[in-house]
Image (cartoon, rainbow, N blue to C red):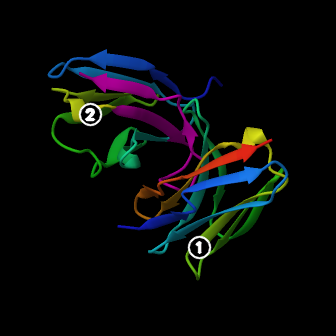
């Protein structure tokens, strides 16, 4: 398996623009996580899906952020409108089991810079 | 919300030294993860444990559920072990420590 695949790897955009990050989890994994990493706050869980259903989105910072998982092999994280404080590395991870009880496999991350 | 504390924040060691990184948490958990993040940014899962001890090569992870504490040990450290090591605990959500930056000098 190719592992968790994220795109784009790097994104530079201007404030106010819509940003869409994409993730393809490992085939057979039933849990998918979106994380954000910044120097100030470290790694933070944004949202967690199990069997394509959002289970916990309490980490989503505000309504500008939304995430979908239309099928078992694809998820998106959308920011609209983007702001400079959204600049971070966004990681997607998948697991074969529920939150925290299975090994986590991370994508390479999407580095977002909002000017 | 679980409070996760890692220590030390930064660690510099000579090649060959035995290294210990600590993680404490405040609320009971179902599992604890140790992750490694290399300077390039990629994150790799090293261990997931809910009790006792696990060993993989030169890496050993232990957890004491009663004391809410886990340690990651590296024996015979090598410059390629230089990375940020992150502890994450799972209760009803996953909470991460701030990480320990390890530098191993030849």
Mark 2 crowd level (few <14, some 14–19, many ≥20, 10 Å Cα): some
Is the N terminus of chain B in the top left, top right, bottom left or bottom right quadrant?
A: bottom left
Residue A23 visible somewhere in the drawing: yes
B11 or A39: nearer the viewer: B11
Q: Is residue A79 left or right of residue A108?
A: left
Q: Is residue A39 left or right of residue B16?
A: left
User: Which percent across, then down, holds residue A89?
Assistant: 41, 32
Q: Is residue B101 magenta?
A: no
Say whether residue A111 is magenta. yes
Who's the residue at 41% across and 19% down the image? A10
Q: Quadrant of residue B27?
A: bottom left
Query: As rendered, which of A70 and A99 lies closer to the eye?
Result: A99
User: What chain is tagged by disc 1?
Assistant: B
Residue A86 badge: 2
Q: Position of residue A57 (x, y in %)?
A: 29, 48
Q: Is residue A4 above or below residue A58?
A: above
Residue B3 pos. (x, y %):
41, 68
Give the residue number, with chain letter if any, for mark 1: B69
Q: Magenta stretch?
A: A88-115
């Amino acid at each position: 398996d190719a592992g968790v695949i994220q795109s784009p790897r790097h994104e530079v955009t201007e404030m106010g623009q819509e940003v869409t990050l994409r993730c393809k989890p490992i085939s057979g994994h039933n849990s998918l996580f979106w994380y954000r990493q910044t120097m100030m706050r470290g790694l933070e869980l944004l949202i967690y899906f199990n069997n394509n259903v959002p289970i916990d989105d309490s980490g989503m910072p505000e309504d500008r952020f939304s995430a979908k998982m239309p099928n078992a092999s694809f998820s998106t994280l959308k920011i609209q409108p983007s702001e400079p404080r959204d600049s971070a590395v966004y990681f997607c991870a998948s697991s074969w089991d529920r939150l925290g009880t299975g090994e986590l496999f991370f994508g390479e991350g999407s580095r977002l810079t909002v000017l | 919300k679980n409070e996760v504390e890692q220590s030390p924040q930064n660690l510099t060691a000579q090649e060959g030294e035995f290294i210990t990184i600590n993680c404490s948490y405040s609320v009971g958990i179902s599992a604890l993860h140790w992750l490694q993040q290399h300077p390039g940014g990629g994150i790799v899962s090293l261990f997931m444990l809910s009790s006792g001890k696990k060993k993989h090569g030169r890496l050993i992870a232990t957890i004491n559920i009663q004391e809410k504490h886990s340690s990651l040990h590296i024996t015979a450290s090598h410059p390629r072990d230089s990375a940020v090591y992150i502890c994450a605990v799972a209760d009803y959500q996953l909470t991460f420590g701030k990480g320990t930056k390890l530098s191993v000098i030849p």
